[in-house]
């Protein structure tokens, strides 16, 4: 049987796997689904059309699935979808989407979301992320896989951060951060590539060298974006293992709409 503390309020229409544990004084609404192995701590609120996968640990005082902080929201049944293996710490708030976008806020798998993080409506977050304490994401933000945002980073709405990118403490992001790039400052400036993170994930020295070359073409040669993209494309084939990294960078740059951090 599901282990629900007697003081918790779980709507009988909610769908909880029999292995789910719910702490004292938590509230779970009628349209919530919680997968196997999840632990919901005390004093949490799970509401709205919210789905959690398996083996998520939600710590005390988190709020998941509340209505978006958008004055255009009219009560539509938008959603929050959370994957599996996530750690969601104290006072984290994640809102549902809006009909002005896809209508869904998404969080992938195996993410580490620290205390006081806010993930606003329609954000699309990948997997293996680390969002340090008090990171604040405005609406419609996209984060690729393996992104690390330093504590108190603030991200403007519609900004995209590419896979394996990283920000320093108290970074203010109002433009896109390409994959692999480390940025910091207020406003943010590109600083280097996230070489240490890549090494920890098993990237070879040769593959990292190609990524460094892409960074130099974008930020150190004084090239226009179109010229930099042409020279990045010319790197294909030099290190076959890095061709996927080149494709990732090119796809990101092709979709850039807010400009890049400089």
Image (tube, helix red, strand yellow):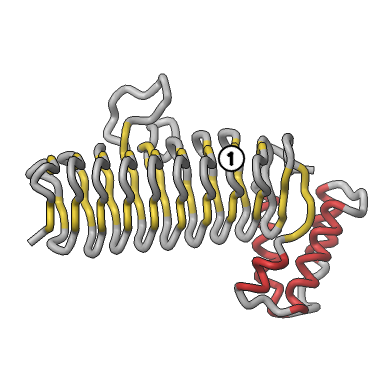
Image position of 249 with respect to 200: above or below: above
- Between 214 and 173, which is closer to the camera in this rendering? 173
The percent position of residue 128, horizontal first and vertical second, equals 50, 62
Q: Is residue 62 visible?
A: yes
Q: Is residue 21 above or below residue 50?
A: below
Relative to 173, say whether 57 is above or below.
below
Q: x, y percentage for residue 90? A: 38, 45
Percent coordinates x, y for residue 232 in the rendering: 80, 62
Can the viewer see residue 257?
A: no
The residue lying furthest to the right in this view is 222
Q: Quadrant of residue 194?
A: bottom right
Quarter of the image that includes the N terminus = bottom left
Seen at 67% across and 35% down, the residue is 174
Which quadrant does the C terminus fall into?
Answer: top right
Q: Is residue 186 left or right of residue 51?
A: right
On screen, residue 152 versus residue 64, left or right, reads right
**Which element carries disc 1, helix, strand or loop?**
loop
In the image, 144: left or right of 38? right
Residue 135 location in percent, x, y? Answer: 54, 42
**Residue situated in front as seen by the camera: 98 or 84:** 84
The residue tagged 1 is: 152
For the residue carrying disc 1, how many other residues have a C-alpha within 10 Å: few (<14), some (14-19), or many (20+)?
Answer: some
* Count of residue discs: 1
Residue for point 41% across, 27% down: 69
Instruction: Pick out the residue farthest to the top.
Output: 71
Q: Along the line of sight, which residue is nearer the eye, 15 or 44?
A: 44
Using the image as rendered, state which of residue 46 and residue 253 is in the foreground: 46
Which image quadrant is residue 3 in? Answer: bottom left
> Which corner quadrant of the image does residue 18 belong to?
bottom left
């Amino acid at each position: 049987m599901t282990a629900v503390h007697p003081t918790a309020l779980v709507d009988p229409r909610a769908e909880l796997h029999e292995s789910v544990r719910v702490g004292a004084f938590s509230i779970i609404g009628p349209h919530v689904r919680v997968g196997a192995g999840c632990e919901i701590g005390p004093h949490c609120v799970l509401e709205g059309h919210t789905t959690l996968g398996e083996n998520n640990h939600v710590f005390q005082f988190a709020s998941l699935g509340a209505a978006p902080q958008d004055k255009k929201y009219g009560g539509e049944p938008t959603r929050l979808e959370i994957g599996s293996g996530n750690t969601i710490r104290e006072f984290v708030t994640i809102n549902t989407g809006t009909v002005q976008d896809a209508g869904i806020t998404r969080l992938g798998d195996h993410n580490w979301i620290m205390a006081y993080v806010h993930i606003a409506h329609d954000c699309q977050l990948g997997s293996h992320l680390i969002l340090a304490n008090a990171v604040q994401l405005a609406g419609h933000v996209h984060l690729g896989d393996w992104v690390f945002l330093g504590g108190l980073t603030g991200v403007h709405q519609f900004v995209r951060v590419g896979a394996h990118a990283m920000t320093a403490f108290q970074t203010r992001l109002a433009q896109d951060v390409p994959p692999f790039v480390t940025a910091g400052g207020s406003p943010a400036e590109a600083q280097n590539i996230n070489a240490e993170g890549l090494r920890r994930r098993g990237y070879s020295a040769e593959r990292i060298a190609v990524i460094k070359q892409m960074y130099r073409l974008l930020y150190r040669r004084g090239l226009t974006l179109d010229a930099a993209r042409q020279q990045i494309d010319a790197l294909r084939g030099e290190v076959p293992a890095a061709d996927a990294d080149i494709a990732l960078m090119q796809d990101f740059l092709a979709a850039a709409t807010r400009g890049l951090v400089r």
